[in-house]
């Protein structure tokens, strides 16, 4: 932890050096903020004309000059009046606005290095020479304060490490990340598209990408059937009142699409009101009836549960749905498939008794582990999200929260993986377990989740009849092993670098012929493969065999079946495999096909794991 803190201080200090270098080269630049990040630092600036890659190189060279000057980081505490005068003299309006964020009575600190004095609460190395290895990476756009209605600033990203060796290792990792970027591979492999005319953050699954999605859904459905889940479907839109009752609308209002007014009610409303603000306020307060694109499926599943009476003998009731939900993300936060506005969750809700809670949580965790094992995702940790006792965002009583948190902590302790408990990470209605996966290039992603909820059953007055013939309140478990299919598939593209295992590959076998004389036999083989459920295509281009092989490799087809005179004469197939070297060679036709079927049916992963492909 000390080394991590020291690295964070170094990166924060590097951001100050970046600001100083910018002002040396561009004295008219207006600066906003420059924090350290998990992998580096950035600084937001307002400057015209936009910076170029050549400017970035000049700024980095100036940063190295400042580092060599061995400037000391000195703290100065100023009164509010002194701070205002200073920032006005420096002609830094964004800093002046940030000053207004500091509460009255709180110390106002500035840090000086050389000629640059920056509003900052601290966390620095002692001198600029303590910054050992830096690199400016790129320039991007960023709205001031993250608000699309504000001016877009230029954000300069950089990184810093304790040694050149560490920096070079990180840069190599970034190069690998570029090769595996799901946005690039998704386009090259024709897996998905995001069309601006359709809408930002809304994924169009192309046929090849839809195959991967469908295979994952089939896998999950098999596991659901084994554990006794029942499939349900709920609409994409519901009355706003439903989400007021659940608490989702008031708690997550800013991250949801705006409500849609009921057309009849709107007509009556507009007879007395005329402004957009009044309409919005009417929807939010319930004066005006409206609908909401569903941000989650739980209220729908609750209504399915409550549509009929239940006895304790029926519990647990497990309802599952691949439900598409909608969240309003800022455009600057959207990122290919991993940060979108419409996504499908492998969602499920379990309604159970208090006595069944522990075993149901265990079963949920086992399902997530089965998925991760099947996909060779062994590098993950478990984060238990607890409520922050000092926050007022949570609903429910203390006893219910304590029961729920204890149940999750006991279940997580059995997993045999690193576990951390983090206050403030709970949902407003209950604590949760999140599976945080580290991908092959070292980044962390929150995927599967299991949440215990005593509060929504209370809000919706859910009951079951107990053995005492009295009404009792069920406990509710929210559970999504993959999380979002969009995010999960985006991660899988990068995890495998597009080299999908056979069972997930959009094209599993490509049939190649030595020349056109064997085209008829290749067509018969294609039909045989397809009849057995193998996704196969023929390369019928009039190219040499070597060209066809290279094309199949470039397009990341896992297996090639090659036909020539010898193969046709002996009713055999020459097999080349990009990911399973043990099945390469010439085999009788039935045996070659059986080997592919085994890889598919057993969902076997490549012998060469994703890191080394």
Image (tube, rainbow, N blue to C red):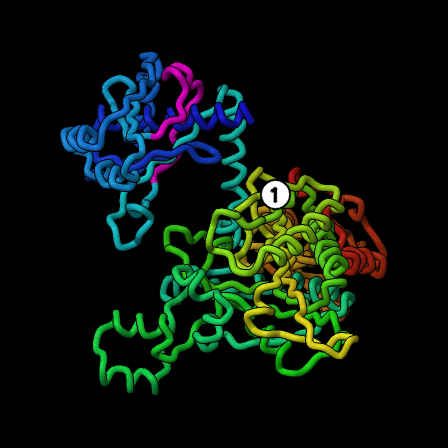
Residue 434 horizontal side relative to residue 56, left or right: right
Per the image, the residue denoted by label 1 is: 421
Residue 247 horizontal side relative to residue 496, left or right: left
Residue that appears at 43% across and 60% down? 201
Q: Quadrant of the C terminus?
A: top right
Q: Position of residue 567 (x, y in %)?
A: 80, 56
User: Depth check: 241 or 154 in front?
Assistant: 241
Q: Quadrant of the N terminus?
A: top right
Q: Position of residue 407 (x, y in %)?
A: 70, 53
Whether the magenta-drawn stretch holds residue 461 is answered as: no
Residue that appears at 71% across and 79% down? 310
Circle 1: element type: strand
User: Depth check: 395 or 486 in front?
Assistant: 395
Whether the magenta-drawn stretch holds residue 122 is answered as: yes
Q: Label 1: how many residues lie within 10 Å, few (<14), some (14-19) or many (20+)?
A: some
Q: Determine if residue 501 is in view.
A: no
**Range covered by the magenta-colored residues:** 121-139
């Amino acid at each position: 932890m000390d080394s991590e803190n020291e690295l964070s201080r170094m990166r924060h200090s590097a951001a100050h050096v970046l600001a100083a270098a910018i002002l040396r080269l561009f004295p008219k630049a207006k600066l906003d903020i420059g924090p350290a990040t998990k992998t580096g630092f950035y600084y937001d600036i307002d400057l015209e004309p936009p910076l170029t890659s050549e400017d970035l190189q000049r700024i980095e060279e100036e940063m190295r000059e400042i580092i060599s000057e061995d400037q000391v980081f000195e703290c100065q505490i100023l009164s509010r009046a002194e701070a205002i005068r200073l920032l006005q003299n420096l002609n830094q309006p964004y800093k002046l606005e940030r000053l207004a964020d500091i509460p009255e009575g709180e110390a106002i600190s500035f840090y000086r290095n050389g000629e640059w004095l920056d509003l900052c609460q601290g966390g620095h190395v002692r001198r600029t020479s303590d910054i050992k290895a830096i690199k400016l990476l790129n320039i991007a756009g960023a709205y001031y304060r993250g608000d699309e209605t504000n001016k877009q600033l230029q954000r300069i990203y950089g990184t810093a490490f304790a040694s050149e060796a560490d920096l070079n290792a990180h840069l190599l990792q970034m190069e690998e990340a570029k090769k595996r970027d799901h946005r690039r591979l998704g386009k090259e492999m024709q897996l998905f598209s995001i069309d601006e005319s359709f809408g930002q953050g809304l994924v169009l699954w192309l046929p090849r990408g839809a195959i991967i999605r469908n295979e994952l859904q089939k896998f999950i459905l098999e596991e659901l059937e084994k554990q006794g889940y029942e499939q349900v479907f709920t609409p994409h839109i519901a009355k706003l009142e439903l989400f007021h009752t659940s608490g989702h609308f008031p708690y997550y209002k800013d991250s949801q699409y705006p409500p849609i007014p009921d057309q009849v009610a709107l007509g009556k409303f507009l007879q007395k009101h005329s402004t957009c603000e009044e309409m919005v306020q009417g929807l939010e307060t319930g004066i005006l009836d409206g609908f909401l694109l569903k941000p989650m499926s739980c209220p729908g599943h609750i209504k399915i549960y409550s549509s009929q009476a239940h006895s304790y003998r029926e519990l647990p009731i497990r309802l599952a749905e691949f439900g598409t939900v909608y969240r309003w993300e800022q455009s600057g936060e959207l990122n290919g498939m991993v940060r979108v506005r419409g996504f499908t969750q492998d969602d499920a809700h379990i309604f159970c008794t208090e006595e069944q809670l522990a075993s149901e949580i265990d079963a949920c965790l086992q399902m997530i582990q089965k998925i991760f094992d099947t996909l060779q995702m062994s590098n993950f940790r478990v984060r238990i999200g607890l409520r922050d006792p000092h926050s007022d965002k949570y609903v429910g009583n203390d006893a219910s929260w304590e029961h729920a948190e204890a149940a999750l902590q006991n279940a997580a302790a059995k997993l045999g993986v690193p576990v951390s408990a983090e206050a403030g990470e709970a949902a407003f209605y209950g604590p949760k377990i999140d599976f945080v996966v580290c991908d092959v290039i070292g980044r962390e992603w929150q995927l599967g989740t299991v949440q215990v909820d005593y509060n929504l059953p209370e809000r919706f007055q859910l009951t079951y009849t107990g053995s005492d013939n009295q009404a009792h309140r069920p406990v509710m478990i929210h559970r999504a092993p993959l999380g979002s299919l969009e995010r999960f598939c985006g991660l899988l593209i990068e995890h495998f670098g597009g080299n999908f295992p056979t069972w997930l590959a959009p094209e599993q076998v490509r049939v190649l012929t030595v020349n056109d004389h064997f085209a008829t036999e290749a067509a018969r083989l294609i039909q045989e493969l397809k009849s057995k459920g193998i996704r196969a295509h023929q390369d019928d281009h009039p190219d040499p065999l070597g060209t066809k092989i290279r094309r199949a490799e470039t397009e990341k087809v896992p297996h090639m079946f090659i036909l020539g005179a010898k193969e046709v004469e002996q009713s055999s197939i020459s097999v080349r495999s990009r990911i399973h070297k043990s099945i390469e060679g010439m085999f009788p036709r039935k045996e070659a096909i059986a080997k592919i079927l085994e890889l598919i049916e057993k969902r076997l992963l490549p012998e060469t794991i994703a890191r080394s492909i």
